[in-house]
Amino acid sequence: MPSKHAEDAFRILESDQIIDSFTRAELASSTIARLLSFRCREAREQALPNQDYARISYRKDGSSLSFCVSDGVSSSYKGDFAACCLAAYLVKWLQELPAEAARHERLDAALRTQLDRLAVQAQQQLQRLEMEPGTPGLVREVLEDLRQNYGSETVFFCGRLDYEMSIDRQRAQLKSAFFCWMGNVTARLFLNEQQYILLGEKTDKNGRWSTRHGCRGELHTWSRSLSTLERLIVHTDGLDAIGETLSTLDDDAWLAEVQRLLASSDSDDMTVFDLSWLPAEDAEGTWR
């Protein structure tokens, strides 16, 4: 258990699963984050929670950042529960991970074991959640079966970035990066404005974490010692249609594109986390 002093060294930025939101925040000198999370058209009309969830933990001294973007599986029972539960766990795990451990070749096996253990605890918590009052008997019976046999499920993409800190308050130099994912959340790592590395499994329909079954499918890990990274963009599949253009859009354009996508009856929940290392004179936003 980390000390209270260790916990105070971090700040948290997260999305809201009830309220559609857009936040632009300066995390540290020259480090700007944008976080957008909107429910799909159906969820907005029926006042349902967002199945997506994003959580970012940033060390106040700028030496490391951990994050997770998750997308609850809508065909499972309360996918929003798994998305939030797993993201919170992964960010805490990454935050406490020794920097050198992120390059260990057996880290994926150790994490898989931990996520399977987490599933047991999460399923017990899920079983204690009350269903909506007034749920018809037949519907309640179907939902109980879904909860018991499938549980709550989510796909995710998480990572940790570590930096070499300078003593003259210049922009920190990226030292290493570690990423882990299951399923179809997409990430782009921009080495410069034109060149990026694409991570995530767009066609993976089976990889996910389940409160009932633990890890289902392949758990992917990727780590590198990187000397440069200008930008990182991670988004859920509700934004796949504009994923390649997200890096070119300013705040207003992001919001305009979201409204355009929401006009479609088959829109999906949309979440995107954009991290850039740029001059921050005009940065706005606050921590939650």
Image (cartoon, rainbow, N blue to C red):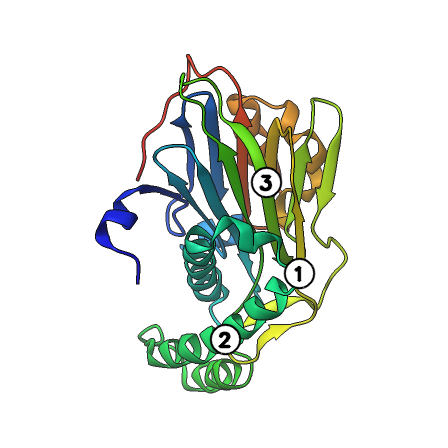
Q: Nearer the viewer, mark 2 or mark 3?
A: 3
From what the image shows, is residue 231 above or below residue 184? above
Residue 214 drawn at (x, y percent): 56, 76
From what the image shows, is residue 214 above or below residue 71? below
> Where residue 208 is drawn, which disc sits there?
none
Residue 81 drawn at (x, y percent): 43, 65
Mark 2: which secondary structure?
loop
Residue of label 2: 211
- Residue type at mark 1 is Glu
Q: Residues within 10 Å of mark 3 (few under 14, many from 20)?
A: many
- Residue type at mark 3 is Ser
- Residue type at mark 2 is Thr
Residue 58 drawn at (x, y percent): 40, 40
Comparing 159 with 39, the one in front is: 159
Residue of label 1: 105
Residue of label 3: 176
Mark 3: which secondary structure?
strand
| Quadrant for the C terminus in the image | top left
Comparing 236 with 62, the one in front is: 62
